[in-house]
Image: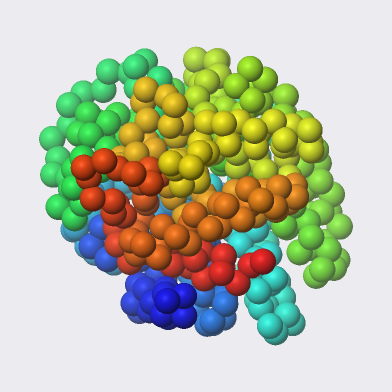
């Protein structure tokens, strides 16, 4: 069974790899290149096709803007099966946007640094991979410079996101608190996602009104970060996003040390790390909840909900051993249990929890992969093994879906996977997990 599934995972990735040197997340539903998807996909490719892994990252990093920004979607092709597309986003409004690729004017969690390190870890030919990293690493460093110089208005070492899509956790119940502060106009548009997936599993039409309104504000200001920080109704310090930045900072430090001769960059990265980790622990940890939370910069208040993002700092070695223990206790108390797979994307004990709807409760393999490695970091071996076992079991039962119901007994509903099928990062990270002890 496992050997057949491994072959199927490879087949999924190979089928989704496109002639332009990038991999789509899922046929039909997601026809372009997504930033953090590409990173996870490259990790899977590194196990069996190093050239595809390198091509995936090379193509993504080639889309970088002149200011170091890397967009969350790169529109390599003309395809009208996805909304909102290149014509809506108008990345060309920014004077430093890529002249080679059309894209969005927003980004996604900065995974590229730790992805390069994972590729080096996996590669059999370390010298070959290190030569590739030497070619590309400065682009990732420049991306981090962009974040610290343009997305940290208070010089705290914590960067903001200006759109829920930048978080990667698109319609999390966390954002409901922000939607309550907004009243965007009604937009007239044709949804394309619901032609591929049951509408009950996707964000609502009214949620999309909020999404499009935030993009319109950014476009009216030519995607200028200073203006966005001043005017966007959505301005959030996200624990997942900042944990990925911190994790990638550390990866860059270690890779630059391997390469040698980059003392100034290493010094800068160490300074960022010290400030970021201190601020992260001081500002984003909620003692009463026993978890890290999001912070709403626009309204200057914490958004006090527990999500799978709340535990992502384990992956980046951010909490102390004592705080890590508190985090794991919170995870197992709220998200664990014999009747559930680890780890739901939103607190199953909360009234907003929905186990079938995108980021409002289902299990996501990319989050489980990060939590599995984070738990291993802190020697929570039993919980780490449970995270890995649950992830593999979901894939074995239902296939390489985008997300999964965390309930083991769904009552009268037939259990299944949700969202896109033959989903690239589910296949890629399955490959990595079965190769990781």
Closer to the camera in the image, 201 or 375? 375
In the rendered structure, the answer to whether residue 156 lies left or right of residue 170 reads: right
Closer to the camera in the image, 186 or 263? 186
Closer to the camera in the image, 434 or 42? 434
In the rendered structure, the answer to whether residue 89 lies left or right of residue 254 reads: left
Visual colour scheme:
rainbow
- Figure check: 2 above or below 216: below
Q: Position of residue 223 (x, y in %)?
A: 43, 39
Q: Quadrant of the N terminus?
A: bottom left
| Residue 277 quadrant | top right
| Residue 75 quadrant | bottom left
- Figure check: 251 above or below 409: below
Q: Position of residue 309 (x, y in %)?
A: 54, 38
Q: Position of residue 251 (x, y in %)?
A: 72, 57
Q: Quadrant of the C terminus?
A: bottom right
Q: Please report the residue visible at 57 percent of the width from the left and 52 percent of the height from the top.
A: 386
Q: Please report the residue visible at 37 percent of the width from the left and 51 percent of the height from the top.
A: 403
Q: Please report the residue visible at 67 percent of the width from the left and 20 percent of the height from the top.
A: 287
Closer to the camera in the image, 285 or 398? 398
In the rendered structure, the answer to whether residue 233 lies left or right of residue 209 reads: right
Residue 222 visible in this rendered orientation of the protein: no
Q: Position of residue 81 (x, y in %)?
A: 19, 58
| Residue 182 quadrant | top left
């Amino acid at each position: 069974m496992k050997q057949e599934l491994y072959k199927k995972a490879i087949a999924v990735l190979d089928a989704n790899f496109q002639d332009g040197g990038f991999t789509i997340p899922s046929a039909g539903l997601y026809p372009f290149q997504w930033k953090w998807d590409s990173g996870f996909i490259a990790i899977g490719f590194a196990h069996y096709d190093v050239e595809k892994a390198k091509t995936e990252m090379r193509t993504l990093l080639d889309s970088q803007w002149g200011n170091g920004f890397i967009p969350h979607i790169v529109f390599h092709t003309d395809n009208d099966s996805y909304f909102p597309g290149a014509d809506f986003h108008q990345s060309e409004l920014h004077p430093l946007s890529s002249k080679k690729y059309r894209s969005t004017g927003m980004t996604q969690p900065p995974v590229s640094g730790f992805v390069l390190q994972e590729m080096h870890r996996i590669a059999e030919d370390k010298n070959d991979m290190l030569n590739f990293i030497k070619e590309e690493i400065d682009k990732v460093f420049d991306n981090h410079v962009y974040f610290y110089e343009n997305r940290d208005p208070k010089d705290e070492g914590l960067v903001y996101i200006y759109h829920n899509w930048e978080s990667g956790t698109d319609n999390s119940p966390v954002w409901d608190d922000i939607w309550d502060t907004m009243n965007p106009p009604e937009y007239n548009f044709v949804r394309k996602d619901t032609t591929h997936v049951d509408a009950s599993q996707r964000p609502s039409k009214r949620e999309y009104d909020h999404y499009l309104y935030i993009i319109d504000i950014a476009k009216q200001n030519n995607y200028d970060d200073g203006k966005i920080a001043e005017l966007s109704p959505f301005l959030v310090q996200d624990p997942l996003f900042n944990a990925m930045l911190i994790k990638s900072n550390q990866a860059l430090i270690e890779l630059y040390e391997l390469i040698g001769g980059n003392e100034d960059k290493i010094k800068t990265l160490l300074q960022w790390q010290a400030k970021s980790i201190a601020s992260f622990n001081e500002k984003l940890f909620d003692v009463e909840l026993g978890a890290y939370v999001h912070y709403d910069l626009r309204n200057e208040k914490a958004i006090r909900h527990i999500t799978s993002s709340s535990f992502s700092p384990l992956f980046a070695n951010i909490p102390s051993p004592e705080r890590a223990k508190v985090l794991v206790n919170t995870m197992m108390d709220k998200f664990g249990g014999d009747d559930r797979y680890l780890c739901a994307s939103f607190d199953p004990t909360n009234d907003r929890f929905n186990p079938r709807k995108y980021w409002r409760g289902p299990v996501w393999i990319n989050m489980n992969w990060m939590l599995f490695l984070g738990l291993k970091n802190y020697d929570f071996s039993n919980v780490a093994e449970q995270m890995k076992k649950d992830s593999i079991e979901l894939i074995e039962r239902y296939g390489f879906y985008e997300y999964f119901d965390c309930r083991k007994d769904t009552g009268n509903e037939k259990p299944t996977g949700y969202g896109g099928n033959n989903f690239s990062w589910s296949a890629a990270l399955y490959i990595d997990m079965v190769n990781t002890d």
